Amino acid sequence: MTDKGPPDRNSATEQVEIVLPAPKASPGRRVVNWFLAGLVLTGPIAITLYLAWTVIGWIDAAIVPLIPERLNPANYLPFPIPGLGLIVSLVVITAIGFFAANFIGRSLFHYGERIVGRLPVISSIYNALKQIFDTLITQRGTSFKQVGLMEYPRKGVWAIVLIASEARGELGHKIPGEDLIGVFMPTTPNPTTGFLMFLPREDVIILDMSVEEGAKLIISAGLVAPPYVPGQSGPGAPTPKLTTPPNSSL
């Protein structure tokens, strides 16, 4: 008869699996979670409606007093009409666009632009605003197409930049070096201000995110990061070639 010896306690212990029940959240904690979930859902909607209502109020305050009293429907109704100034503005802007689409309207607008172009300061402001509106609305002008990274303000610190285009004209001719690109480094949380810089293409890492995703990242101060699937692109990969729209210039 073979003596098997005492049973192995370690093996017996390994066979025993103790499953502990998940701790239940307290009623107060569940109420807090419900409140936070509701806040996440209703917060953006409430802020959007508030901002829209505020803008409509500004437009009404500026436009409604200009409407003749006999044409103002608020004088014939027992209640005010919110958004009346916005409606009138849309109708007037549409009518101006319709008038400018024919030959007589285009001739009058071109004549007015020539007059404005002769004014020293106003012409510069008008031309800049016109180019901005052409870029944002009609997409006829140049616009940012890509997002990149550059080391700023010191080595090892990276800043998000928007790629404008290659340095052309006098800038490309007089700036020493080759293969220069223009980048705009916006500030956060207000991306309408920033710094315009020209630097070698090799100093910029082109990102895969779109300009809209880059703008969200900047406005949110880095809190809203776009999704990314790791691939061949990234800080360690070669910098892709800059995509420049045709007939674009800085």
Image (tube, helix red, strand yellow):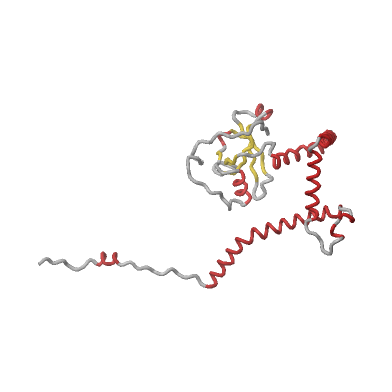
User: Which residue corresponds to the image point at 72% horizontal and 56% vertical from the top-left?
Assistant: 52
- Residue 124 locus on image (x, y percent): 78, 37
**Which of the 4 image quadrants contains residue 173?**
top right
Q: Is residue 204 above or below residue 27?
A: above
- In this rendered view, identify the residue nearer to me: 107 or 145: 107
Give the left or right position of residue 91, taking residue 212 as reference. right
- How many labels, in total? 0
User: Which residue corresponds to the image point at 53% horizontal and 73% vertical from the top-left?
Assistant: 27
Give the left or right position of residue 27, taking residue 96 as reference. left
User: Which residue corresponds to the image point at 9% horizontal and 67% vertical from the top-left?
Assistant: 1
User: Can the viewer see residue 50 in this picture?
Assistant: yes
User: Which residue corresponds to the image point at 61% horizontal and 61% vertical from the top-left?
Assistant: 41
- In this rendered view, identify the residue nearer to me: 136 or 185: 136
**Which of the 4 image quadrants contains residue 8?**
bottom left
Residue that protrudes farthest toward the left in the picture = 1
Residue that protrudes farthest toward the bottom in the picture = 27
Q: Quadrant of the C terminus?
A: top right
- In this rendered view, identify the residue nearer to me: 17 or 186: 17
- Residue 189 locus on image (x, y percent): 65, 50
- In this rendered view, identify the residue nearer to me: 21 or 238: 21
Give the left or right position of residue 12, taking residue 91 as reference. left
